[in-house]
Image: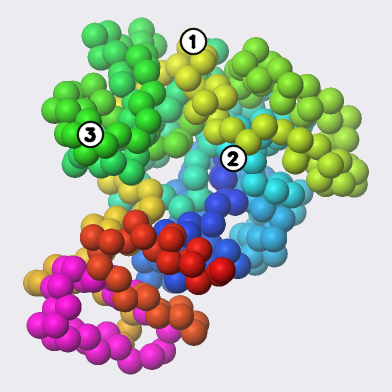
Amino acid sequence: MALRKNHLVIMAGGVGSRFWPMSTNEMPKQFIDVLGTGKSLLQMTIERFDGICEPENMWIVTNVKYIDIVRSQLPKLPADHILCEPCRRNTAPCIAYVSWRIKSIDPKANIVVAPSDHIVTNVVEFQRIIKECLKFTGETDSIVTLGLKPTRPETGYGYIQADLSSSSLRNKEIFRVDSFREKPDEATAIQYIKKNNYFWNSGIFLWNVSTIVNAFRVYQPKMSKIFESLLPIYGTDKEQETIDKVFPTCENISVDYAIMEKAEEIFVCPSDFGWSDLGTWGSLLAQTRKDLYGNGCIGDNIQLYESKNCMVHTLQEKKVIIQGLDGYIVAENNDTLLICKLSEEQRIKQFIEQQDK
């Protein structure tokens, strides 16, 4: 597949509330240097596709309040390739909008859709897989998703059940999807990882623009009519004004429910390239270099004594000294300090809601 036909869509409108106080409504985690590398997760995501997609074929879909942040972090991105959602309506309307927008200028486009806040440790393998899958979607009317080989009974991810009995004739690494499974409880997750045909759902999708547009026409006709009717105004000065009016009328639904669970030509490419969706402080600890006592520290001025299994994130200039903690999150951002047991981190969202009352 010619490089110039490859398009990248990055979804960057989420809030990442489980990463509070580092991630806030004003500055969500995708725009933050989470790993202490000097680059935001969004910038790292863009770099990951270098050599797969030309800069002029990269698109960001984000909330209107983050447009200036995106522009400042990605100055080489064409200004009209930052698409603004006036409100949050989950992933299906977001993908429908950008799909018809791309179709208006490139009706043969081959598209990869990726979240903005994941990390990949083996970029070479990641790029190989993406290129193979783009070749597959460029030659077929298929939708492909990347499934990650599970390493633990994770309850925070959805799972993909694959039919491994026979691979696609075009690519021996690609298999049909039997079913998509919701985030399981721990007992169910343990059963999944005992089998070899269950994979974590990465939320990374690949398709030809005609394939996804036709899928919306069949399975989401009301939504497809909205965005298809806008073909004459895409790329004009009326686009944002019109999107602001029609986007809130779309159903609030994920692309998994809207398309993936209904479409017939759905395939999965089982992959292993060191992936994490960085959805929690615990997942950040798993990806961070640790000391002899299992502590992960991101920040320049942190000292720990008699502490173990802690995740400490303080990128600002304060000196941090911690003694006697076991299994805690210590995170500081601006005027806010969080100290919370890692085992209780699922309550962080609840803490924020109580604080805002």
The magenta segment is 302-330
Q: Residues within 10 Å of mark 2 (few under 14, many from 20)?
A: some
Q: CA distance from mark 2 to mark 1?
A: 22 Å
Relative placement, left or right, of 102 versus 137 is right
> What's the residue type where badge 3 is placed?
Ala
**Residue plotted at (78% across, 22% down):** 225
Residue matched to label 2:
90
Q: Which mark is residue 189?
A: 3
Regarding mark 1 in the picture, which secondary structure is present there?
A: loop
Q: CA distance from mark 2 to mark 3?
A: 25 Å
Of 197 and 262, which appears nearest the observer?
262
**Residue plotted at (45% across, 36% down):** 204
Establish if 329 lies above or below 170: below
Regarding mark 3 in the picture, which secondary structure is present there?
A: helix
Q: Mark yes or no: residue 2 visible.
A: no
> What's the residue type where badge 2 is placed?
Asn
> What's the residue type where badge 1 is placed?
Glu
Residues at marks 1 and 3 touching, judged by CB atoms closer than 8 Å: no
Tell me the quarter of the picture where residue 72 sits: bottom right
Residue matched to label 1:
264
Q: Mark yes or no: residue 158 visible.
A: yes
